[in-house]
Image (cartoon, rainbow, N blue to C red):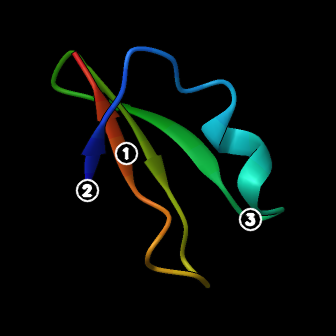
Amino acid sequence: MKVRSSLKSLKNRHRDCRVVRRKGRIYVINKTQRRYKARQG
């Protein structure tokens, strides 16, 4: 999982990417392509 300063560009890598907030952190997750993961904060 990558820790990134900007997640807006990562959302465009795949059409199933979702931006999710958990415990004050922002994550990019993808159910179909598991390798697309990132965290911010």
Residue 9 placement (x, y as % from top left): 69, 31
Instruction: Rate crowding at label 3 as few (under 14), some (14 to 19) or many (20 or more) other CA atoms within 10 Å.
Output: few
Residue tagged by mark 2? 1
Q: What residue type is labelled 2?
A: Met
Q: Residue at 68% across / 41% down in the picture?
A: 11
Going from the N terminus, do you reach mark 3 or mark 2 first?
2
Residue 4 placement (x, y as % from top left): 36, 27
Residue 18 placement (x, y as % from top left): 62, 48
How far apart marks 1 and 3 lie (CA) works out to 14 Å
Going from the N terminus, do you reach mark 2 or mark 1 first?
2
**What's the mark number on residue 30?**
none
Q: In which quarter of the image is the N terminus?
A: bottom left
The answer to whether residue 38 is above or below residue 31 is above
Element carrying mark 3: loop
How far apart marks 2 and 1 lie (CA) works out to 5 Å
Residue tagged by mark 3? 16
Element carrying mark 2: loop
Residue mark closest to the camera, 1 vs 3:
1
Circle 2/circle 1 CB separation < 8 Å:
yes
Q: Which amino acid does label 3 sit on?
A: Asp
**What's the mark number on residue 38?**
1
Q: Which amino acid does label 1 sit on?
A: Ala
Q: Is residue 39 left or right of residue 8?
A: left
